[in-house]
Image (spheres, rainbow, N blue to C red):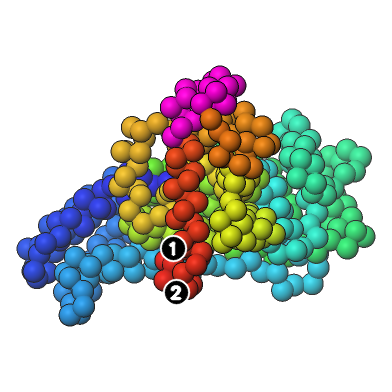
């Protein structure tokens, strides 16, 4: 996500590196590079102008603290301005309304409205503990209603079903009546899209908005379209009271122009971002955390939240007790890997760590981490339960058998055992330290 923008901003920050003072000449060069790199990232021209001007003025007007170098001072100002243009803090959903709260999902065809509707419903059910009903009023696109139903059923989410209704308004009325009857707290309406903004679509959306008086009107935008996404947001905002935006496909966006421009140009806050194809790949948008990731400073809070929501607390506690007693086995190691995999690919997890963005190219030249994990899994699964429970029984003949069974070499088996023993030694030692001296995330 935003790899190209991150690389360019890091290059810009290097122009200040090693300087003893932030002179006008140094700032002129740094700001020139900032302007060029943000424009290359497809950020709105006015946003770039205001951003660079604010950074320069604050850098000149603010005294560098004794505890900071000029480089750290400049980075902090860039971070604060990035956070500011993206909205300063996370924008919450309006859930304090009389149920059913109606969420109207709007946007162009192909932006990801249906998928985002299902992701949002899953988020509201799993994280907010809300009873959600999904309803499609797209009577134009073939199989649009069926598409929502299939995606929702795969996540055990409730959908509105009724005989075929040719009127959008009539279908919306029936959906609301069903939501009331089923005691749903939130009704998510997936509306029809078009290939471009047109009068017919806008009139239909305005009619739905008048009928429902929705708690949220969420515009779904394809983040990879850059400035087009910003222009589309402006066109929708002229006709609808948008309460927020969902930026999709950010996992494939290396530039970040839309994320940096939408809020600043339209005033419409980004509430969620789509970061993958899986139903759980919808994240609350935190401007401060995104600014930190863009500057390759990591995002440890999001990583900790992901771990907390994904990992099984009971299993984690069980493993922790075994580690403390130095009873951690290869079987436990395998179970631990399965828990980690639930959080996503190894490469994606690395992006949450400070400095890992700059190491991305080096990492890509190495053997894929996920491929290495699959090899480890294959080796452990080729062991008998007794071998997983006690690594001491792994003599030469057993290791040859395990290598044959896992499609690997004996050296791979030996390496795994050596790494396991070293990891077990370190984990056991760490578990005996006071909490404040352990370091790390937790």
Are the two marked residues, 1 and 2, in contact with CB atoms closer than 8 angstroms? Answer: no
Residue 314, image x and y in percent? 70, 59
Instruction: State the residue position of label 2.
Output: 436
Pointer 1: residues within 10 angstroms few (<14), some, or many (20+)?
A: few
The front one of 22 and 309 is: 309
The secondary structure type at the circle numbered 1 is: loop
User: Could you tell me which residue is drawn at 23 percent across and 68 percent down?
Assistant: 72
User: Could you tell me which residue is drawn at 67 percent across and 37 percent down?
Assistant: 386
Q: Image quadrant of residue 347?
A: top left
Pointer 2: residues within 10 angstroms few (<14), some, or many (20+)?
A: few
The secondary structure type at the circle numbered 2 is: helix
The front one of 436 and 192 is: 436
Q: Which range is magenta?
A: 396-415
Is 191 on the left-hand or right-hand side of 52? right
Residue 363, image x and y in percent? 35, 38
The front one of 175 and 336 is: 336
Residue 83, image x and y in percent? 39, 66
User: Could you tell me which residue is drawn at 72 percent across and 74 percent down?
Assistant: 96
For residue 151, say whether it is visible. yes
Q: Number of callouts in the render?
A: 2
Can residue 414 be found in the magenta stretch?
yes
Instruction: State the residue position of label 1.
Output: 440
The front one of 366 and 292 is: 366
């Amino acid at each position: 996500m935003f790899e190209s923008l991150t690389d360019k901003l890091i290059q810009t920050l290097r122009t200040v590196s090693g300087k003893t003072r932030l002179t006008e000449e140094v700032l002129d060069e740094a700001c020139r590079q900032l302007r060029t790199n943000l424009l290359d990232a497809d950020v709105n021209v006015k946003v770039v102008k205001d951003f660079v001007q604010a950074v320069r003025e604050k850098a000149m007007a603010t005294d560098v603290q004794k505890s900071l170098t000029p480089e750290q001072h400049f980075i902090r100002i860039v971070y604060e301005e990035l956070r500011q243009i993206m909205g300063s803090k996370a924008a919450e959903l309006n859930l304090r309304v009389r149920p059913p709260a109606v969420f109207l999902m709007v946007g162009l065809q192909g932006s990801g409205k249906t998928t985002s509707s299902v992701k949002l419903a899953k988020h509201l059910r799993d994280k907010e503990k809300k009873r959600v009903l999904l309803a499609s009023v797209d009577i134009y696109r073939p199989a649009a209603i069926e598409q929502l139903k299939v995606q929702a059923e795969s996540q055990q989410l409730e959908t509105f079903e009724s005989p075929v209704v040719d009127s959008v308004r009539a279908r919306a009325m029936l959906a609301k009546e069903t939501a009331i009857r089923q005691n749903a707290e939130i009704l998510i309406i997936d509306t029809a899209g078009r290939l471009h903004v047109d009068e017919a679509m806008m009139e239909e959306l305005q009619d739905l908005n008048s009928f429902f008086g929705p708690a949220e009107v969420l515009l779904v935008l394809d983040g990879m379209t850059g400035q087009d996404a910003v222009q589309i947001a402006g066109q929708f905002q002229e006709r609808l009271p948008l309460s927020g935006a969902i930026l999709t496909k950010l996992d494939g966006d290396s530039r970040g122009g839309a994320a940096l421009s939408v809020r600043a140009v339209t005033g419409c806050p980004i509430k969620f971002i789509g970061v993958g194809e899986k139903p759980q790949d919808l994240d609350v948008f935190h401007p401060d955390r995104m600014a930190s990731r863009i500057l390759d400073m990591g995002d440890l809070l999001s990583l900790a939240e992901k771990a907390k929501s994904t990992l099984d607390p009971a299993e984690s506690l069980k493993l922790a007790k075994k580690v403390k007693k130095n009873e951690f086995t290869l079987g436990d190691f395998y179970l631990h890997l399965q828990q980690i995999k639930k959080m996503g690919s190894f490469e994606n997890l690395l992006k949450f760590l400070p400095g890992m963005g700059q190491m991305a190219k080096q990492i890509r030249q190495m053997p894929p981490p996920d491929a290495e994990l699959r090899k480890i899994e294959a080796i452990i699964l080729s062991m008998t339960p007794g071998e997983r429970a006690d690594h001491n029984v792994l003599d030469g003949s057993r290791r040859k058998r395990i290598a044959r069974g896992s499609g690997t070499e004996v050296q791979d088996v030996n390496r795994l055992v050596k790494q396991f023993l070293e990891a077990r030694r370190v984990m056991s030692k760490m578990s005996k330290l006071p909490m404040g001296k352990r370091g790390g995330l937790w």
